[in-house]
Image: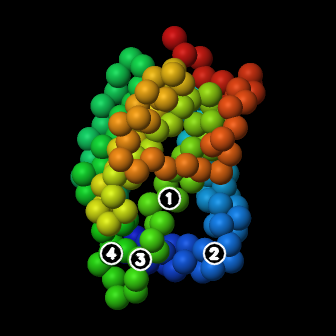
Amino acid sequence: MIPSDHFTKFYNEVFKFLETQGDDALQAYWLEISRNQERHTLEAFRDYGLEGMRDYWEHIRIEENCDLNLELHEDRLELRMNACPSLGKVMDNDAEPMARYCDHCAGWIGPIMDKLGYSLVYDVIDRQKPQCVMQVFKDPDQALEAEKNAKLLMGWPGKASNEPAPDDLKVKKS
């Protein structure tokens, strides 16, 4: 298994290469990452909703030694990354970080949330600082309101689509 500090540097170089191939290539790669991540997240997110998402990112917080805060509310989950280890490792490198490195998180998370009928607000804040705020809302109107406060709002492949999630994937939102 490749150590995480090598993996993030490898990821950075793959992203930079794909960016030279055009935005479509980069977004296709992020969608492929999203499809792969579905194997690890979709069932828990669908079956347990915001609690399942919190449990997933709590596991990531410990596994990747992330300085982050997770707040579960009745209507949303908020993740505040205070010091992203992934971007931090990329910035602590002799190779130049890809300018849009942080976009890959929303690039894989967004399509999953769209499938499940949740509304994602992903604020990178500043591409030069390893921090961000991710909010997952049950109510799309609350997400639209939260977007107004974002400093650097991320998009993802398919974000413009406002089509509802298929019934078999929708989360039971109690």
For residue 16, above or below residue 85: below
Where is residue 86? Give x, y as percent. Answer: 37, 65
Where is residue 76? Give x, y as percent. Answer: 41, 26
Front one among 66 and 88:
88
Q: Residues within 10 Å of mark 2 (few under 14, many from 20)?
A: some
Residue indicated by mark 1: 103
Q: Quadrant of residue 32?
A: bottom right
Q: Secondary structure at mark 1?
A: helix
Where is residue 98? Give x, y as percent. Answer: 46, 74
Q: Residue at x 34, y 88 (%)?
A: 94
Q: Is residue 158 left or right of residue 82?
A: right
Q: CA distance from mark 3 to mark 2?
A: 14 Å
Q: CA distance from mark 4 to mark 3?
A: 6 Å
Q: Residue at x 40, y 46 (%)?
A: 123
Callout 2 amino acid: Leu
**Picture disc at residue 97:** 3
Q: Secondary structure at mark 3?
A: loop
Asked if residue 59 can be seen in this view, the reply is no
Q: Disc 2 vs disc 4: Cβ atoms closer than 8 Å? A: no
For residue 110, above or below residue 97: above
Q: CA distance from mark 3 to mark 1?
A: 12 Å
Residue indicated by mark 2: 18
Q: Residue at x 40, y 83 (%)?
A: 96
Callout 3 amino acid: Pro
Q: Disc 4 vs disc 3: Cβ atoms closer than 8 Å? A: yes
Q: Secondary structure at mark 2?
A: helix
